[in-house]
Amino acid sequence: MGLFGREEATEYEIIPGQNLRCEICHHGRFYSREGKIQTTGMTFLDLDWANASATCLVCEKCGYVHWFLPT
């Protein structure tokens, strides 16, 4: 069982031929989640739902979150 339910952690290839390694513990398996990129202006206007999203990969071993903006 994974950190957030039944999902299993997997490896992610960030650039061709190179898998992601955790910046903290160097582990190579992650859980994938979506995260909102909060901005002061949108929060002030109570429009947080309209903020951009990013892909978050959470290290299976230490829990460090790696954020990836859409390309």
Image (tube, helix red, strand yellow):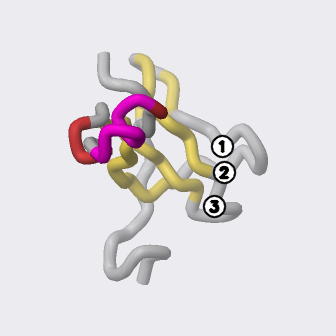
Does the CB distance between marks 1 and 2 fall below 8 Å?
yes
Rendered residue at 62%/39% (across/down): 21
Closer to the eye: label 2 or 3: 3
Query: Looking at the image, which is closer to me, 48 or 23?
Result: 48
Rounded to the nearest angstrom, the CA distance separating label 1 from label 2 is 5 Å
Query: Looking at the image, which is closer to me, 15 or 71?
Result: 71
**Three-letter amino acid code at the position of disc 3:** Gly
Rendered residue at 48%/33% (across/down): 40
As for residue 54 lying within the magenta part, the answer is no
Residue pointed to by mark 1: 22
In what quadrant of the picture does the N terminus appear? Answer: bottom left
As for residue 42 lying within the magenta part, the answer is yes
Give how far across and how far down residue 11 sits, in percent. 44, 47
Does the CB distance between marks 2 and 3 fall below 8 Å?
no
Question: Which is nearer the N-term, disc 2 or disc 3?
Answer: 2
Say few, some or many: other residues with alpha carbon within 10 Å of mark 2 (under 14 / 14 to 19 / 20 or more): some
Closer to the eye: label 1 or 2: 1
Residue 57 marker: none
Asked if residue 1 is positioned above or below residue 41 in the image, the reply reads: below
Residue pointed to by mark 3: 63
Question: Which is nearer the N-term, disc 1 or disc 2?
Answer: 1
Closer to the eye: label 1 or 3: 3
In what quadrant of the picture does the C terminus appear? Answer: top left
Residue pointed to by mark 2: 27
Give how far across and how far down residue 18 sits, in percent. 51, 24
Say few, some or many: other residues with alpha carbon within 10 Å of mark 3 (under 14 / 14 to 19 / 20 or more): some
Question: Which segment is the magenta one?
Answer: 41-46
Rendered residue at 38%/53% (across/down): 32
